[in-house]
Image: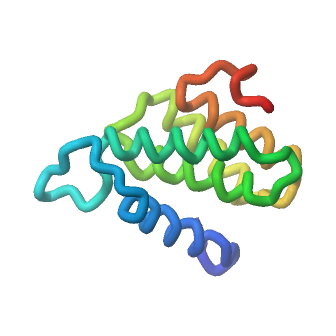
Amino acid sequence: MIFHERPWTIALIAAGAVAPAGGGYAAGARTPSSAGPSCAEASQLVNGFVEEWIKLDKDDARRLLKARSAADVIVQNPDCFSFSSKVQAQSAADRLGRSGNSLAIRLAAGMAVCEATGRQPFTCQR
C-alpha cells in the first residue's frame, strides 16, 4: 500500500487505530505482546463497519471508508479470520486502492467485505 498516492489511506488507518480505543470494545483478552485488538474485538469492529456500510445509501461516499476500514481490520488481524475472509478482504482492499472512486467498485468491494463476515449476499444489500 502506498500512502502518498491516496491521502485518505492515512485517515483510514488513523480511524482504524482510534475506533477500537474510542468504541469501548472489551470483549476479548489481549496477550502482553499484542499491540492490536483481540480477535473478539477485531470481529466486533469489522461487523460494526459492515453494519454501518449496509445502512448507508449506495452512492454515499462514506461507504468507501466503512468497506476499507473493515477490509483493513481483517487483513491486519490474519489469525482472527478464516482464509477465505482474508482473501475477500484483501481483494476488496486492492479494488478500493486501485479505483475506489467508482460506484461499482465501491459496491463490489463492500459486498466482498460483507460476505467475508459470513453474511449471505442478500443480507449485504439494502
66 relative to 126 in the view: left or right: left
Question: Across the whole image, how many numbered discs are drawn on residues?
Answer: 0
Above or below, 73 relative to 17: above
User: Which of the 4 image quarters holds residue 44?
Assistant: top left
Image point (50%, 43%), residue name: 46
Vertical comparison of 49 with 108: above or below: below
**Quarter of the picture holding the N terminus:** bottom right
Residue 109 x, y percent position in the rendering: 72, 43
Q: Residue at x 71, y 35 (%)?
A: 111
Q: Is residue 67 left or right of residue 75?
A: right
Residue placed most toward the observer, 30 or 56: 56
Residue appearing at x 41%, y 34% in the figure: 81
Specify the quadrant of the image occupied by residue 82.
Answer: top left
Q: Is residue 25 left or right of residue 88?
A: left
- Image coords of residue 98 (percent x, y): 75, 58
The chosen color scheme is rainbow
Q: Residue at x 25, y 61 (%)?
A: 35
Q: Nearer the viewer, residue 28 or 90?
A: 28
Residue found at the very far front of the displayed protein: 24
**Which residue appears farthest toward the left when viewing the image?**
32
Residue 126 lies, with reference to residue 7, above or below; the image says: above
How far across and how far down the image is residue 40, in percent?
33, 39
Q: Quadrant of the C terminus?
A: top right
Q: Tell me where residue 62 appears, x and y as whole percent.
A: 74, 58
Q: Nearer the viewer, residue 91 or 54?
A: 54
